[in-house]
Amino acid sequence: MSLLDVADHHLRTPVMAAKPIVFVVDDDISVRESLELLIRDQGWAPLLFASAREFIARKSVSVPSCVVLDVNLPDLSGLDLQQQISGASSISPIIFVTGYADIPMSVRAMKAGAVEFLSKPFDEDTIVEAIRSALHKSEMMLAQEIERGALRDRFAALSKREREVMALVVRGLMNKQVAGDLNISEITVKAHRGRVMRKMQARTFVGLVNMANELGMRTGSKA
C-alpha cells in the first residue's frame, strides 16, 4: 500500500478531523484583522503574529495548516523565515502576500516551495481559494507523515533476524540465496519472510518493496 493510498483513511482520524489552522504573519494590524474575520468565516482557526520571531516561538501543531506570510516583516524577512520553516518535515504550505512584489522575489519564493504569491490588496475569493488549496496540500502531507511514522514503528517491531531477511528479500534475493547468506535453512527463511509480511502489513511483495523504499533501504526495484 502506497502512502497516497492511505491518505483517505488517515483524513478520517481524530487528528485530521481537527479544525485546520491558518497562521497569519504580517506586521500590518489591519491585514491581520481582516484576514482573521475571513478565516473564521470559512470555519478555519486563525492564529495571528506581528513578526517572524513571534511565529518561530509558536507551539508546533499536528493538524492541517498553512501560513499566510508577508514578505516584508520588521525583524526577519518573509523569504528568510521561509528558509527556516520549510523542509521535508514541514506540513504548513506558505502563501506569500506583499505590497512590493517583483518577479525575482516571487520566483525565489516559488522555487523554495511557496504555493502562492499574491500582491496586496488581494481579492477575498483569491486568498480564500489559495488557503483552501494550501490546507488540502497540508492534509495530504500530514497523512503521509502519519503513515511514515506508522511504517517506521512497524519496522522497529521486527526482530533483528526479520530485518536481515527483509533487507535481503527486498533486494531481490531468492529464499535459497537468503538462507545461504544468513547461514540458516530455507524453511526458516520462509517463516521469517511470512512474519515480516504480516508485521509490516504488506499484502504483496511489491508492497513490501515500496515500504522498504520509503524506509530508505536498498532494494532491487523502485516499484
Image: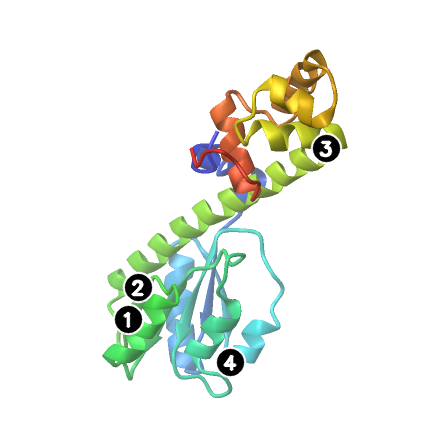
The residue positioned 48% from the left and 39% from the top of the image is: 11
Q: Mark 4 or mark 1, which has the lower sequence index?
A: 4
- Check if mark 2's residue and mark 1's residue have beta carbons within 8 Å: yes
- Check if mark 4's residue and mark 3's residue have beta carbons within 8 Å: no
Q: Mark 2 or mark 4, which has the lower sequence index?
A: 4
Is 164 or 132 nearer to us in this picture? 164
Q: Is residue 188 above or below residue 35?
A: above
Q: Circle 1 is placed at which residue position?
A: 118
Label 1's element? strand
Residue 102, image x and y in percent? 25, 81
| Other residues around mark 3 within 10 Å, as few (<14) / some (14–19) / many (≥20) | some
Q: Circle 3 is placed at which residue position?
A: 157
Label 3's element? loop
The residues bearing labels 2 and 3 have C-alpha atoms spaced at a distance of 45 Å
Q: Circle 4 is placed at which residue position?
A: 51
| Other residues around mark 4 within 10 Å, as few (<14) / some (14–19) / many (≥20) | many
